[in-house]
Amino acid sequence: MSSGVATPILSKPVDVAEYLFTRLHQLGIRSVHGLPGDFNLVALDYLPKAGLKWVGNCNELNAAYAADGYARVNGMGAIVTTFGVGELSAVNGLAGAYSEHVPVVHIVGCPSTISQRSGLLLHHMLGNGDFNTFADMSTPISCAVAKLTDPSQIANQIDNTLRECYLKSRPVYIMFPTDMVEKKVEGERLETKIDLDEPANDVEREDYVVNVLLKSLHSAKKPVVLVDACAIRHRVLDEVHAFIDKTKLPVFVTPMGKGAVDETHASFGGVYAGTASAPAVKDMVEGSDLVISIGAMKSDFNTAGFSYRLSQLASIDLHSDSCTVRYSEYPGIRMKGVLRKVIQQLDVSLVTALPPPKFQEIEGKSDPKAVINQAWLWERVDRFLREGDIVVTETGTANFGIWETRFPAGVTALNQTLWGSIGWAVGACQGAALATQDDAGKAKARRTILFEGDGSFQLTAQEVSTMIRHNLDVILFVICNDGYTIERYIHGMDAEYNDVMTWRYKDLPAAFGGTEETAKSYAVHNRGELEELLADQDFNDRKGLRFVELYMPKEDAPKSLILTAEAGAKRNAMTE
């Protein structure tokens, strides 16, 4: 007997999996991270037809970190996991992507709609018959959730969810039942790409913000610009550079915003992080009568223990979803539209632009037999970096030390300062290196350089095998300083819980399948050995993995880390 519901006629029917993966390809994704599981295997068969490469990670947590790193370089990333056991292993990495505004598409292969309606007790379940438990867990760390259960709605769901991922620059969750993989949807929709244009600001309210900003800028005597991570994530760096090119205003970045501004630019002044800033940087930013803040994320590590000393009366904060002018907030007024109008309308003759602080170059030669300490290393790194490099720093000494390194033009810096999950950087490095490899058809592939503490490395070391498997161009420095130095400065300098087992790190590439052609290991114990390595032509020019054991003193830390830890301890003491 007929149900009375007409079956829609599709002019160009395509399977749901083909539709979904084709949309990912149209959004610029070329590689998909994740692990196979019985609830996603059939869907994975569709990847090659859509022009997508399967990465195949060592575990789902690492895959989530890698998709995060891939998205930061490529613009968007994707991960496929299986129901329950797989998706929950990825949750930490996706929570980090959510907190740091990184657009990652999480596709979860799950039991069929028939099994769900029948309430079958299947593997990977909690035994309570609830098939939505894990999706509910992911809802707070996703800007959109789509459960693909109705073929008549699936194409709309996919398009709307992917659009939200891009515009809000945060992860989305797609629940993909096994019996929906081969269902048909209208393929003609694929001929029209998803609309990724930002909604226009309310003109009257936008114009008010623009007018107040211009009035403040034209009357200020010591204005500065402060650029943070959300300027990167929400794609306003072109506007930022157009603004500083036109105004010549001194521009600073936060630790999370490192790499947002061309550090060879005449207006670049350095990293501002409250009390952990260089004195000249601190004086100029905190002495300003107008701070134009773009994309701020004022977390504890990003502000050196909330040690900012900026007056709200002298601040204008531009964000992806609102603008704040002194004490007045304007929800829904996005920074991209405001910046574009400000650039068009500002009167350069009324702008006072002071010169930024001068960068202090290293003077003299160092004793080649001296130990490699934090202060020397990070000031030395800038002469090793090349234009266009991708520099990944782990939560720990590297995240703080890199503040002191002046980047060549076009360097991309990746850090996880807000979420701060140690081990993130190994996976993120793999994803970032793969993203630049995927983009090599458009431009020359860039080097990806990782600075990773030994304690952090031990959490996610397996992804070195993924780097080797895909022949990625990675230079990996493992900082061997006997454990969790960042934790030592927070609490427990000599505590056993901050120690780790000493591995034979440079043997790992071979253990993970590396050959003389695909991976080479090195060890440096003093400044002379590091100088020799960094000057070695083969080390610089060879492809594949270059894996370096870099030995440093156990209790040595960058000054910025020490100051941040002290500020945090002082704050905690005041609240006890």
Image (tube, rainbow, N blue to C red):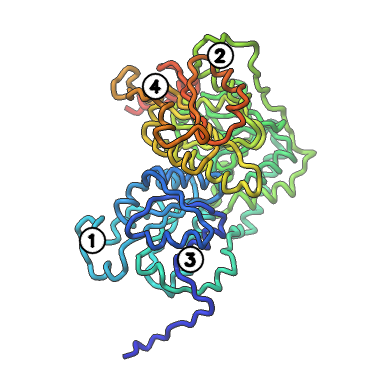
Q: Residue at x 63, y 49 (%)?
A: 441
Q: Name the residue under label 3.
A: 18
Marks 2/1: CA–CA distance: 60 Å
Which of the two discs, 1 and 4, sits closer to the camera?
1
Going 48% across and 40% down the picture, which residue do you hit? 430
Residue holding disc 4: 489
Whole-Å distance between the Cαs marked 2 and 3? 55 Å
> For numbered disc 1, what is the local secondary structure?
loop
**Amino acid of disc 1:** Leu
| Occupied quadrant, residue 480 | top left
- Where is residue 478 shown, x and y percent of the image? 45, 27
User: Quadrant location of the C terminus?
Assistant: top left
Tell which of 552 and 257 is nearer to you: 552
Q: Is residue 324 visible?
A: no
Residue 13: image location, x then y, percent: 49, 75
Marking on residue 528: 2
Q: Earlier in the sequence, mark 2 or mark 1?
A: 1
